[in-house]
Amino acid sequence: MGFTATQQNRENGVTTVGHQRTFLQQVRKLTPLFVLPVGCLFIDAAHANPRTDRPVTRPPETAVVQIPSVSRAPHLEDFLQMRPDTEWEGKLTRVGGFIQRAPDDGQPATQPTEVYFGYDQRNLYVIFVAHDAEPKKIRARLDRREGMASDEDQVGIYIDTFLDKRHAYQFECNPLGVQDDSIRSEDTDSWDESFDTVWESRGKVTPQGYIVWMSIPFRSLRFRHATSQEWGVLVWRFVGRRSEGSFWPRTTSRIRSFVGQEAPIGGIEHISPSRNLQFIPHINWRAFHAVDTRDPANPFYSNSSAEIMGGVDAKAILKDSVVLDLTAKPDFSQIESDEPQITTNQRYKLYYPEKRPFFTENASYFDVPMAVPSQHLLFTRTIADPDFGIRLTGKEGSYSIGVLFADDRSPGESVPASDPVSGKRAYFDVLRITHDLPSRSNIGVTFAAREFAGSHSRVADLDATINVSKTWKAAVMAGYNWNRSLDGSAFSGGDVDASLTRVSRGFNYIGYFLDRAPGFQPAMAFYNHSNWREIGQTFAYQFWPRNKWITRIWSEVYAARNWHFNGDLNWEGVSPTVKVDVKHNTTVTGYVWMWHDAFGPQDFVVLHQVHKFPLVPAYGIAIKSTQARFLNFKVSAEWGTRSNVLPPAGQAPTQAHYQQAEADLILLTSRGLTVTNTYLFDHNANLGGGAIYNAHIALTNWNWQLNRELSFRFIGQYNAVVANPLFTSTPTGRAFNADFLITYLVHPGTAVYIGYNSNLSSPGPDIVPVRPGFVNDGRQFFVEVSYLLRF
């Protein structure tokens, strides 16, 4: 049971630090311990008192803000006086009057902001003039692209190019012009962080605040093929020292929909991303030393001093709104590492998100509404080693479509050469279609299949997402899975996921039900396990006191029960939680978890009947803060009694006392250096006091951003598990990993990476006689180059 490192969640246009995954969430992976709906996390925005010498556009609900065409591109230097210079006076559309979403929903923003719009035949121009009465308190750092800290000042824009109030592009910058982009999906209440496209930005801090200039190419957007475009827009500002986020037009947290509160804009005519073709050739050279375990009985070291690989990714825009992606010998190297997790004493498998560009781009077109956010009907990390891939995504009218086809060499390469399936490939086919319904509801169907050497796993689903009101939403998914194993045996089963949620500024609720048959085991999905039923509810209420110290109080009660298809109990419990936000940037959380597990023959063959453990408590506390400008931290602890689910072979599970802790300390400088230090600890002991195991993870991450393009990164991670074989089957071991990376990123698609990775372990692989100390069981030096060509 363990922790993940800090997760980044997107809320109301601001990156906010999410909740750690505690032991409780690992035990009951189906539901987050802390349910933070969309309206809850958003941090306050900027004051909208406009300058009195210029009128501010405040359109009524039905008005369409007109964007003017310009003969030349405006530049950041044209606004250094915190207003357009004489040449641009009156030639751009200006909006202002920003209103807070939180903490003071509906109140004017505390710092005034104006936004100017214009366009030419190639680009949309957006200029933010962010006034600040205390400019020395502006938080702006030289970060890597998409690497802004959660407490930095930021501005951004949402663009709904189909005006369907369901999806929107988001472009955001800090005061130095560092970029981040994503896609907001109302269907799943999420931000697709994998979206990366080419656009330009600049930023400058001034004695009166800061200015951010954006140039967004139309070829980086998808929209209807029409002479005149009408889009939806939201613009926002985040004030880091107050955790304040404000919007134009007003975007209240009292309504569930986010993009649904946008303002319409028009006047953009005779534009098109047509003939938009792009190619990204890439080449990778590496020298490596690694362990080959295809034949577990005879592992050996594999070496190469010069392995060269190359390929190309291609993209074509069809009819302005549909995208065809092709890849041959795809660049699926994962430059970004997975976050550390403690893997000891896990009842269910851990979730690691997909990070490979080909699969993450436009991934929202394949999303199926499941009751548990970290579970997916299509999980592309199961496609481990493809040679080619084809993807078609887009929207025509009220229909959205996603098609994916790819191969996978890994099943035939992960077995000895003597195996009958050696050298054979698996093939994946996916089709998903969704149809928009009124009130931002939709209905969808999915079919996915994995075929390998005569075996198959196929799944089909029918799902619907229904917005019941401005605050309530219901979702249901019914799927069925057919499987045929390599030995010819067949099995099948169905799955039903249903949820009902309410998101508002006050009362919040989530209720869900899962019904997963024993035969529901789709090979392309990520889920905890089949053969279970679960029902759970969370009731939460947040208070917003008018107090200079306490800005929000979140209270919550969660209760759930999980049982097998034959009626045997799996686990059940209840957990109250209280969370307090102090002075905007510090959060204190405390919770209690009362639950008990049950195990039977289907869990452990040594058991002949269901064994229920007594009800036991666990307690947790966490403190996180971005109060200091150059120092962020998070500390948490959890302790109590839980199950030892990995006893020695042939023994039944027992109860154990445990303690867990996590500490994160992040040093942030304005000169581009960010240092993150993380320590994770997990301890299990018998009820009588004898230690079962101790697990430690210590990680340090140094990132130095020299300029917008060039950065250096070093990661060092030490893992250690000291286990008692009398009480657990968890092995004792130590490992140290060092990772050094130089990145030169011009823009998405054009980059140079130079890296070195080395892994030491003790005990080492079972290849040479066991010797004390660390053994180098893997090292790699690589150079990777890619270049984006757009036509």
Image: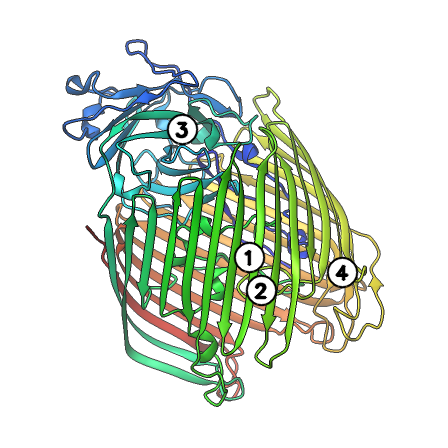
Kindly report the distance in space between the C-alpha atoms of the residues bearing marks 2 and 1: 8 Å
Tell me, yes or no, whether the two marked residues, 3 and 4, touch with CB atoms within 8 Å: no
Q: Residues within 10 Å of mark 1 (few under 14, many from 20)?
A: many
Secondary element under disc 4, as helix, strand or loop, is: loop
**Quadrant in the rendering for residue 268:** top left
Across and down, in percent, residue 50 comes to: 35, 14
Identify the mark nearer the N-term, 3 or 4. Answer: 3
**Labels 2 & 1 near each other (Cβ < 8 A):** yes
In this view, the residue in front, 511 or 296, is 511
Q: Which residue is mark 3?
A: 236
Quadrant of image for the N terminus: bottom right
Q: Residues within 10 Å of mark 3 (few under 14, many from 20)?
A: many
Which residue shows up at 84% across the image and 56% down it?
Answer: 614
According to the image, label 2 marks what residue?
A: 522
- Mark before the other along the chain sequence, 3 or 1: 3
Q: Is residue 311 left or right of residue 338?
A: left
Closer to the observer: label 3 or label 4? 4
**Which quarter of the figure has residue 211?**
top left
Q: Which mark is residue 377?
A: 1
Q: Amino acid at mark 3?
A: Trp
Q: CA distance from mark 3 to mark 1?
A: 34 Å
Instruction: Say what secondary structure mark 2 lies in.
Output: loop
In this orientation, which residue lies closer to the viewer: 692 or 57?
Answer: 57
Q: Nearer the viewer, residue 781 or 35?
A: 35
Structure colour scheme:
rainbow
Mark closer to the chain start, 1 or 4: 1
Mark 2 or mark 4: whose residue is earlier in sequence:
2
Q: Would you say the residues marked 3 and 1 are in contact, meaning their CB atoms lie under 8 Å apart?
A: no
Indicate which disc residue 564 carries.
Answer: 4
Q: Depth-wise, is mark 2 or mark 4 nearer the camera?
A: 2
Q: Is residue 219 left or right of residue 414?
A: left
